[in-house]
Amino acid sequence: MSPKADKPVRVGLADKNPLMHAALKHLLSEDERFELVFVASDGQEFLRHAAETPIDVGVIGWIIGPSDGRFILDHLNLEDDPPRIIVYTGDGNKTVPSQVMTHGGAAFVSKSEQPTVLLDTIATVAEGRMVFPYMDVRSIYDNPLSTLTRREMEVLSDLSSGRTNKQIARDLGVSLNTIKFHVRNLFQKLGVNSRSQAISLYLKS
């Protein structure tokens, strides 16, 4: 999705912290390059808003329900023209940037950075570029999740959020047997034989 140069970048936010909502609202309102379209408190709310009101760039937290930032990324990956996603987090886990890239994110920004870094990253991502700290990208290609289809990744993301097969089938509008088929396939590809093992591998990747 490439916004026109003469229009502000349409931005959606998702963060569990109300104080962060207020801070980011103020930050974006002070910069005429951006238009804040909506603010969400969890991944499901963000996806619902994004489906109803198109945006160019999403800024999301990593530690956010119902699973974490991967829930948003994996569900957007099935869209034909999804918004580009920046993960903006205070999580100090050094593996998060590579996880964001693995799951289709466009950028990673630490909350320890100056606010101007986030604003410049939003503008850069809207122009079609990616922004990440240095990392060894070879580990991304060794990730077992790379063998999953986009639908299998979505189902695995739903499993990690605590949903049952019946709930996932209802949410996706498919039969229970279809979900069981996807679960069986992803178990085989990941070399696991239980839901807990699959979720554990997902949360580490």
Image: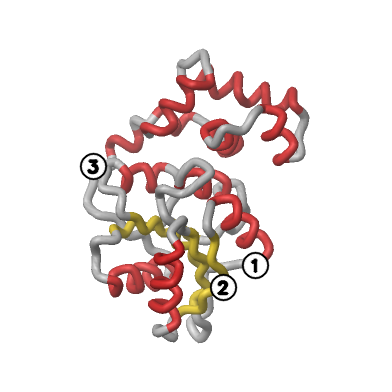
Q: Label 3, secondary structure: give it.
A: loop
Q: Which residue is mark 1?
A: 53
Residue 136's tag is: 3
Task: Pick the quarter of the image with the N terminus.
Answer: bottom right
The residues tagged by marks 3 and 2 sit, at their Cα atoms, a distance apart of 35 Å
- Crowd class of label 1 (few under 14; some 14 to 19; many from 20; radius 10 Å): few
Upstream in sequence: badge 3 or badge 2: 2
In this picture, residue 134 sits left or right of residue 82: left
Task: Pick the quarter of the image with the C terminus.
Answer: top left
Q: Label 1, secondary structure: give it.
A: loop
Residue 167: image location, x then y, percent: 69, 34
Q: Are marks 1 and 3 in contact (CB under 8 Å)?
A: no
- Crowd class of label 3 (few under 14; some 14 to 19; many from 20; radius 10 Å): few
Viewer-proximal residue among 8 and 47: 47
Q: Is residue 185 something one can see in this rendering?
A: yes
Residue 79: image location, x then y, percent: 61, 52
Residue type at numbered disc 3: Asp
Q: Are marks 1 and 2 in contact (CB under 8 Å)?
A: yes
Residue at the spot x=35%, y=35% of the render? 141
Residue at the spot x=54%, y=36% of the render? 161
Residue type at numbered disc 2: Val
In this picture, residue 179 sits left or right of residue 156: right
Q: Is residue 153 something one can see in this rendering?
A: no
Residue 154: image location, x then y, percent: 57, 38
Upstream in sequence: badge 1 or badge 2: 2
Residue 161's tag is: none
The residues tagged by marks 1 and 2 sit, at their Cα atoms, a distance apart of 8 Å
Q: Which residue is mark 2?
A: 37
- Crowd class of label 2 (few under 14; some 14 to 19; many from 20; radius 10 Å): some
The residues tagged by marks 1 and 3 sit, at their Cα atoms, a distance apart of 36 Å
